[in-house]
Structure formats: C-alpha cells, structure tokens
Amino acid sequence: MITLGRLPLVILALCIFFGLFDCAKKNPFGQLTLRVKGKNQHVFLSGEGSPIVVFITGAGSNLEDFDPVQKEISKATRTFSYDKAGIGKSEMIDGPRTIENMTSELLSLLEQTGIENDILLVGHSLGGFVARDFLAKYPEKVIGMVLIDPGNEYFTERVLHTFPEEKRSHLDSLIHTPNPNSPIGFQAEIESRRSWDVYMRNNKVSSSVPIVLIESAHIDESNLLTKEVVGIKQNLNKDFQRQMSDLKIITTEKSGHFIQLDEPELVIKTILDILMKL
C-alpha cells in the first residue's frame, strides 16, 4: 500500500520513468525496424548530440557501406543510416524507385526517429541525388551536405557520346538493364534510372549551406574509367559547383567510386571538418 508520505516519491519515480521513456522514443538508438508504406525498413542510429549526420547509400548498396565512417563519426555526434527499400534488411516498397519516392521514404524514416532538423546529409553516388533533392525540398532541415563521388544527371549521356554511334545503343541497354541475380531493390533502381536524370535536370537546387564534394579521379580503363570519362565527371562537378554559393571540391586519385570504403579516413576528416564549422 502506498502511503501519503511516500506519494511524492512515487510520482517522482513515475515522472522519471515516463520522461526517460519519452526521451527513448524521441532519441532511439541501435538497430531499428520502422514501417514505411506498410513495409519494414531497416535503420541504424548511433552516437549522441547534434548535428545529426544522415548517410545515404548508392544504388544497390546497404548501410554497411558506411560502417567504417559511421563508427568514427558516431564518436562525435549522432548518426543515422538505413537500407533503402528492397536492399539489405529492408523490404521492397511498392512503386518505382524514383528520386521523389526515395526522398519521401527518407523523410518518413527521419520523422519516425524524431530527426527534424540540424541534419548533415552524406550521400554516395545515387545517394547524392537523394541528398540534393532532400535539400531542395526541405532546406530548413539541412545545415550542410557531403557528396561522395555523386551521380550527375548529365554524366551517362556525355559518356555515351564518347563512343561510336553504333555502340551507344548497346551500352545504353547494358547500363539500364538490371542483373536478375541482384537484390530486388537494386533491380528496381536500375529500371528507374532513366527517370533520375530527367528529374534532376528539372529540379535544380540552389543553397547557401556548406557543401563538400569528394570526387574520385582514379583511372581504371578495365572498367571504362578512362582519362576522358574521369574528365567528364570532373567538369560536371565544376558545373554543379557554380550553381552553389558554398561548395568545395576535394579530389582523390587513391580511391575508386566507393571512396568511403577505399579511403574512409578522407571521408571521416571531411565530415568532421564541416561539423566543426557548423
């Protein structure tokens, strides 16, 4: 039986319990399964504090791509990563894998974990498109962005035109035909790939938040990464730089496309440097 004399202590205990419970709801931690459009989606949160670093993977990649980087950044602040639909531990979501849909799904996941603002976006490859679209739609939520060898809406077209006309159709088909043995989410992404370029060309972003773009200048002719192709990418990145008021480009020749795996220390330093300036 609770006596009147002990009642204030009981009330205090309940307040502490529910206060912590509410805090846990607002600041979840670890591996989570959330629902988006009726499907289970896998999220990983680590670290404490603000700003919140949000990692967005490239096409077909799961959140483990950012493991080395997220582990270190989590020592400095709160971090968020996730498997896009149909990849890793996330179930496939109905509908095409358009940039709009992927941005909407990211917003839903962030809202469910109580992340509303002070976001530093870190996007690799396709994730760069999603990061740019998120910034364009929700500028009040974003305080900075790091793009890791990001996609560019003119890159595929420019590269195809470096080949003889009789080869372009075949190469175009290869680029846009999914491997049936790849994850279902990756297949769906490749099927929607043409729409990404069209969408990004029609939805430009202009922002004053600090942005750092890390590009790979690594040449690998066995994978068609010739000096000419790398040059096209670098010129397009410079074009994008001119659209933004505060964009810095960092170039590395030590890494391939997956800079966060080949040279994680560079990505970690870049993120920490931008966090220090925010």
Image (tube, rainbow, N blue to C red):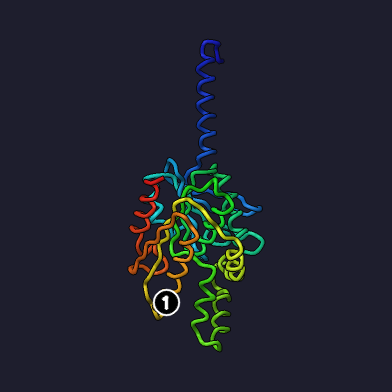
What kind of residue is marked 1? Leu
Residue at x 53% of width, y 71% of height = 154
Nearer the observer, 6 or 88:
88
Q: Is residue 93 left or right of residue 128?
A: right
Residue of label 1: 225
Nearer the observer, 237 or 270:
237
Residue 114 locus on image (x, y percent)? 54, 42
Picture quadrant where residue 205 is located: bottom right
Picture quadrant where residue 67 is located: bottom left
Residue at x 54% of width, y 58% of height = 130
Nearer the observer, 251 or 92:
251
- State the SS at label 1: loop
Q: Residues within 10 Å of mark 1 (few under 14, many from 20)?
A: some
Q: Is residue 78 above or below residue 244?
A: above
Residue 88 locus on image (x, y percent)? 52, 60
Q: Locate the C terminus and report the quarter of the image it occupies.
A: top left
Q: Is residue 74 above or below residue 130?
A: above
